[in-house]
Image (cartoon, grey):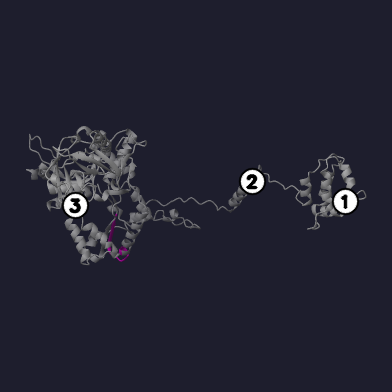
Amino acid sequence: DALPSKPTYCITFIVLIASRSSKSSKSILMATDKTKTWESDEKFAALAAYRGAAAATGGATAAAGGEGGEKKLSKNALKKLAKGKGKKKEKPNWGEAGSGKKAKAKDAKKKAAPPPKKVFVNKTPKGEKKDMSAPMDDGYHPHAVEAAWQDWWEAKGYYSCDPEAAKSRPDDEKFVMVIPPPNVTGSLHLGHALTAAVEDTLTRWHRMKGHATLYVPGTDHAGIATQSVVEKMLMKENGQNRHDLGREKFVEKVWEWKKEYGNRITTQLRSLGSSVDWSRERFTMDDMCSKAVVEAFNQFHESGLLYRANRLGNWSCALKSAISDIEVDYIDLEGRTYLEVKTHKGNPKDPKGRYEFGTLTSFSYPVENSDEKITVATTRLETMLGDTAVAVHPEDPRYKHLHGKFLIHPFNGRRIPIIQDAELVDMEFGTGAVKITPAHDPNDYECGKRHNLEFITVLNPDGSINSEGSQFEGMMRYDARIAVEEALQEKGLYVGKEPNKMRLGLCSRSGDILEPMITPQWYVNCDGMAKRATDAVRNGELKIVPEDHEKTWFMWLDNIRDWCVSRQLWWGHQIPAWFATKKGEIGVNKNDMKWNDRWIVGRDEAEALEKAA
């Protein structure tokens, strides 16, 4: 530092004198030292050397307020000048284009940017071997590398298999695999890509070994999903539903949609390079596949594996169709929860129109010819319209005097028997009394069969209350739930409501809350098939890796239930069965199980007529 280590007396003295407003700038200069000028002072010389002679001189002149009448510097300005801080920094010109950091970074990025990519144009005619005469690109560009090859491979038939040549091969030199057909409405995701890669690797390995190899592609008609997609399209474009068109016209619309949008998956498989034989591509609604379905249905029915029964199953009110167990998703509710229900107009008592779930509602049934009441509880209050019994434990002392007695339904006057069931009732839980609705609950269904109870269905296919619901007829199921609660309160039979953990089953196709409901459907008996599968693992014929998954295998198959294969849809394979009636016959209801033997299964109508005769 050019300045002395101690503050200069010259500057300090000037500051003190300059603060006296009564003194003029001229007298200040004289008071410092009458015999010396500023330039000759050694302290000032040191300041000049630090700041530059010209700047220091100018600053001093300003401080002195010389003859030109320059503006005097303040005390702080003089201090900053002495410390070398008086010089103003140059401010950046923010308004000037290209002066900021971002602009500079952008300029640098432009300089470093790679040259634009070349646009690849496939000049090879479709089905011909790829033209490789163009120079090879510097980098790898998948589109350019993969173009034209798939078309050529298909045209040359490299992935086909000669059936005549395959006949002469031993079984261990034949390899045939069918792609599990993905739904025609969807698109392949990463899981499909992984599966296709593994399948294609196996296929190519066998082909390279010289085996008779066939890898068959196809897509599934996806009955529920496709019908839903087309119905939404019709409503959006024309404001129509399938009933407005009729079955025949609607099915025509679905085929039109399939032809326009149904090749997305096959295009993706081609992009993957899967070595499938496209000449054998199948769609599950093709004539050949339909014929196979009809034949299989008839063979299963003739062998006793396939039958029609009126059983409790999963019913989607949104689809107005039964669905199988594997098409059910579950959500767990920890307590009171409000959910939107698409098939309903909305709950007027909730700001968002939602309905209440996850609660246990208690109410009482009056005992016939008595002042006594029995209190029961349910998470689905609307089902009480179909109650046909109340069960108690046979050893429960609270109800022994009521064995064989009846309760009176508060809305329709139906006599409800009090039954004893040790299998269903836990007398330590709640009141020890359980309402039984055999037509709308799996446990109650089994109880109803044990005690030969009446099975009363209270819902229409769309989820509205039917004629069995007395004054609640026509209400949607969850609107009826609210109305029944209010009606019970008016009758003094409502006890209370509390949060309750529960599990809700949802339709995996529509998201609708499912209803357990008794409907006539077609089922496949799975007991024999399940036993063969479990026996194969137990005797070592089939190995599951890792072994930990054997528990899941046995848990599922040892408790297998018959598979519901019928759906109430317009798009899909029709059940090859006809309902037989006699000429002039009236009062025969095809849905009444009383006439179940009138359903005739055949390969076509002529065969069914022959069987019926």
Residue nearest the observer in this picture, 541 or 527: 527
Task: Provide the residue designation for mark 2.
Answer: 98
- Residue 602 visible in rendering: no
**Of callouts 2 and 3, which one flags the residue occurring earlier in the amino acid sequence?**
2
Check residue 410 for magenta coloring. no
Quarter holding the C terminus is top left
Q: Quadrant of residue 585?
A: top left
Task: Provide the residue designation for mark 1.
Answer: 39
Which percent across, then down, holds residue 74? 78, 44
Residue nearest the observer in this picture, 62 or 171: 62
Decide if residue 91 is on the left or right side of residue 265: right
Q: Amino acid at mark 1?
A: Glu
Q: Amino acid at mark 3?
A: Asp
**Of callouts 2 and 1, which one flags the residue occurring earlier in the amino acid sequence?**
1
Query: CA separation, marks 2 and 1?
Result: 45 Å
Task: Provide the residue designation for mark 3.
Answer: 562
Tag on residue 53? none
Q: Residues within 10 Å of mark 1 (few under 14, many from 20)?
A: some
Which residue sits at x=68%, y=44%?
93
Q: Quadrant of residue 201?
A: bottom left
Start and end of the magenta stretch? Answer: 206-216
Which percent across, then down, holds residue 245? 26, 34
Check residue 214 for magenta coloring. yes
Label 3 close to label 1 by CB (< 8 Å): no
- Residue 592 visible in rendering: yes
Mark nearer the viewer, 2 or 3: 3
